[in-house]
Image (cartoon, helix red, strand yellow):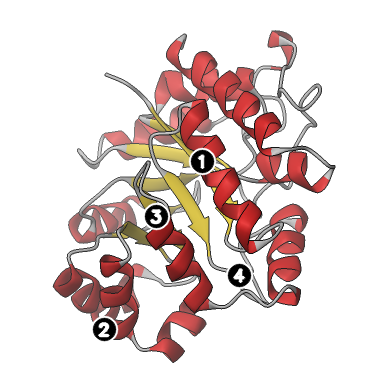
């Protein structure tokens, strides 16, 4: 079975127009789905790279309406909104999920929404036909994993390590993202495989792993255990450091090839 590759792009970064170019580059590189991050001033689950892109997008005037507009223009791959609860709640839950569905969004990740407090959001999302995707950390108890399994309608997002996104990134070699195979999953928790195995005993949902995956070698090793790989900070750092959409396409392509060789 083909393993999912899910890159992350911040809406409105590095500009509203170029953000669309990055989404197209991810699709051309072999992404199966793409997370589109909604910029927020206090992205507590995100590390410094994504925080900086979120702030840059806000400084550039990106709004929630712009995120919807970007989603409407991009139909090459299914998009997943990744956004924090406060802006969604302020916009209005039924309004947000209904608008997202009309824009063609296929699901939503809300990292600061506890499953135990998600009933209202799940009802609004379900009415719009969108699944909410919940996060599991290595510290998540078996009882909570079972709860997330009951509430899920799509894959479960496994956080590979304690901490925030990109916290232990290694820089890919060049914009193409090449790396020495000997790096393996250096910088990731040594227990990723065991973590995936533990959660898999408790659910039949697909399991996709994110946070801290920066190189093709890491993606390959994670894909050997999980059903999908999510990569954000490493991709956005290419853009931050002056890379083009073509560089992003090459990087995503290198991840795709590595995952397919798992």
Q: Nearer the viewer, mark 3 or mark 1?
A: 1
* Residue drawn at point x = 77 percent, y = 62 percent: 52
* Residue drawn at point x = 48 percent, y = 77 percent: 65
Q: CA distance from mark 3 to mark 4?
A: 14 Å
Residue 239 percent across, percent down from the top left: 75, 44
Q: Which residue is identified by label 2?
A: 94
Q: Nearer the viewer, mark 4 or mark 1?
A: 1
Q: CA distance from mark 3 to mark 1?
A: 15 Å
The reply to whether dot 4 and dot 1 touch (C-beta < 8 Å) is no
Q: CA distance from mark 4 to mark 1?
A: 19 Å
Residue 189 percent across, percent down from the top left: 62, 34
Mark with earlier residue (3, 1): 1
Q: Which residue is identified by label 3?
A: 80
Disc 3 element: strand
Mark 4 Cα-neighbour bin, 10 Å: few <14, some 14–19, many ≥20: many
Which residue of the protein is positioned furthest toward the right in this rendering?
A: 241
Residue 262 percent across, percent down from the top left: 46, 12
Is residue 219 shown above or below 159?
above
Mark with earlier residue (3, 2): 3
Mark 2 Cα-neighbour bin, 10 Å: few <14, some 14–19, many ≥20: many
Can residue 118 be seen here? no
The reply to whether dot 2 and dot 1 touch (C-beta < 8 Å) is no
Mark with earlier residue (2, 4): 4
Q: Which residue is identified by label 4?
A: 39
Q: CA distance from mark 3 to mark 2?
A: 17 Å
Disc 2 element: helix
Mark 3 Cα-neighbour bin, 10 Å: few <14, some 14–19, many ≥20: many
Q: Which residue is identified by label 1?
A: 24
Query: Which of the pair 110/247 is nearer the observer?
Result: 247
The reply to whether dot 3 and dot 2 touch (C-beta < 8 Å) is no
Q: CA distance from mark 2 to mark 1?
A: 29 Å
Q: CA distance from mark 2 to mark 4?
A: 20 Å
């Amino acid at each position: 079975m083909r393993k999912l590759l899910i890159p992350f792009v911040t809406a409105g970064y590095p500009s509203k127009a170029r953000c669309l170019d990055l989404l197209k580059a991810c699709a051309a590189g072999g992404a199966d789905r793409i997370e589109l991050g909604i910029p927020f001033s206090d992205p507590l689950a995100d590390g410094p790279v994504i925080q900086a892109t979120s702030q840059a997008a806000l400084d550039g005037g990106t709004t929630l309406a712009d995120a919807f507009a970007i989603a409407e223009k991009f139909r090459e791959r299914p998009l997943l909104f990744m956004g924090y609860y406060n802006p969604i709640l302020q916009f209005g839950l039924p309004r947000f999920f209904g608008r997202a569905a009309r824009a063609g969004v296929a699901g939503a990740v809300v990292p600061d929404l506890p499953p135990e407090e998600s009933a209202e959001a799940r009802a609004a999302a379900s009415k719009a036909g969108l699944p909410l995707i919940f996060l599991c950390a290595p510290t998540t108890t078996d009882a909570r994993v079972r709860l997330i399994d009951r509430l899920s309608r799509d894959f479960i997002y496994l956080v590979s390590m304690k901490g925030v996104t990109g916290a232990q990134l290694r820089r890919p070699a060049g914009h193409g993202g090449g790396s020495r195979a000997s790096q393996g999953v250096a910088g990731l928790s040594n227990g990723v495989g065991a973590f995936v195995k533990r959660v898999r005993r408790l659910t039949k949902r697909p399991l996709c792993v994110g946070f801290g995956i920066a190189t093709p070698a890491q993606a390959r090793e994670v894909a050997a255990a999980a059903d999908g790989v999510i990569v954000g900070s490493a991709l956005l750092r290419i853009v931050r450091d002056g890379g083009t959409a073509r560089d992003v396409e090459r990087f995503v392509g290198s991840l795709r090839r590595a995952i397919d060789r798992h």
